[in-house]
Amino acid sequence: MSKEIRVRFAPSPTGHLHIGGARSALFNYLLAKNTGGTFVLRIEDTDQARNVDTATEKLMDSLKWLGLNWDESIDTEAGEYGPYRSMDRVGLYKEYIQQLLNENKAYYCYMTEEELEAEREAQKARGEMPKYSGRDRDLTEDQRAAYEAKGIQPVVRFRVTEGQTITFNDSVREEVSFESDGIGDFVIARKDGVPMYNFAVVIDDHLMKISHVIRGEEHLSNTPRQIMLFQAFGWEVPTFAHASLILNADRQKMSKRDESIIQFVEQYKDLGYMPEAIVNFLALLGWSPVGEEEIFTLEELSEQFSLDRVSKAPAVFDMDKLAWMNNQYIKNADLDTVVDLALPHLIASGVVSEELSEDRLEWTRRLIGLYQEQMQYGAEIVKLTEQFFKKDVDYTDDAREVLAEEQVPEVLTQFAKELDEVETFTVPDIKKAIKATQKATGQKGKKLFMPIRAAVSGQTHGPELGDTIELLGKAVVGARLKAAVEK
Ligand code: GLU
């Protein structure tokens, strides 16, 4: 029987959920779902200087929003694998550090920051790659005692075997090799005894029986260190899968400061993106389905996902494609969902009040519905519906051109007159008024509709004309028709 699949997403609580992290979480989640395995969420907080207070909560909120629910974490029953927060496991790590010290696979290093810095500078000056020299590798008891007497607190370093090639079979990148000589004896525990990430992660992955480590390519250079540690303990090494880098539209490696890309999941939520669209988009950043289809639910992705279709070629993060994809989801969503995405933005922009009367709410819902086809994300509603919240209208150049046509004054005057006579200012009667204008003026098609649209909305494109007119309301439409004739 093959081994149970257990995967983990292991963020450090240093900030919001980044799209790169979200993709790693997603791939882990999908492999777990695809194989009936277990998805663990582990909080790696041993780098205490970088921890941010509310980050864990926010990370968890974002993952839940995306629908990436975990089977085991700090909020579930700890069972045999917990606790799931590294700082709650420090006692455990210390035992394993002691084991390596006892076996002489690790040692205390008393070098100060200044000494290390001087060493690095000297190496650079000689044109060498900076790497820990190994000064304290083989201290005698007396030497150690002398440092201790001076009150110098040591770190613990792992003794890297020289001349070794570390090779592993990455599920995405196939065979990957590193030379141990390029890796100096690295620190596994800080002065206060708290382990470094590279150590804690190995202990945790082993004790939590993690079968597959799926993470971003930026962690690739950590992997040989981790493998050396697994081997030092005589433990089985998990399967590694390093998903490719994410590039921006200029095909540059995306940096955290790259403003061409919205980088955090929470920002997408705030802008009125749908979690389903984000998940769909992130899945295609490196994984490719069989066939041409591009739209997948989380469930469909879970059914189809496999690591062998994850590519090592860098993935380009195309914001336009994401907006397109989100629009696909918005178009197919029910109105309540779209209203939830868009309404907060109308309220925030001040054009709609937070406490809406029933009529006004209904009007706002219809207005949002009118733009459902077109809207790429919720925040766009403000710009799209601008013309509904002011008296006068700004004409686009195209609209001006239309309004300069010869037949326009007659069409608009007639239409205004017909509108004055309608029984109710609703779509059916508005349509009748348009028909009557057609009859009276002999104008039809573009010559009829375009001037009306341009006059009432300032634009030559837009949603259903009848609905637009009804929602603008009689007074505004009347005034705009008059203004367009007088222009
Ligand atoms: N805590 C690491 C990070 O936030 C996790 C890396 C890993 O998945 O091993 O990047």
Image: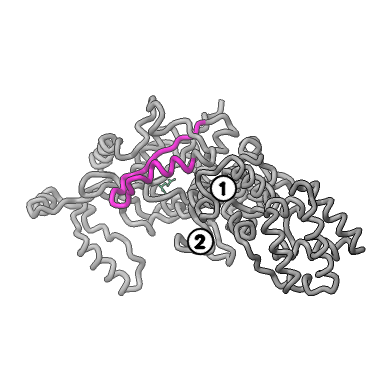
Q: Is residue 182 magenta?
A: no
Front one among 24 and 178:
24
For the residue with label 2, is its CB less than 8 Å from the closest atom of ligand 1?
A: no
**In the figure, 30 relative to 147: above or below?**
above
Q: Secondary structure at mark 1?
A: helix
Front one among 181 and 195:
195
User: In the image, 218: left or right of 94?
Assistant: right
Quadrant in the picture for the N terminus: top right
Residue lying at the far front in this picture: please name it: 421
**In the figure, 56 relative to 408: above or below?**
above
Instruction: Kindly identify which residue carries mark 2.
Output: 254
- Mark 1 or mark 2, which has the lower sequence index? 2
Instruction: Kindly identify which residue carries mark 1.
Output: 343
Front one among 1 and 68:
68
Region in magenta:
38-63
Front one among 321 and 191:
321
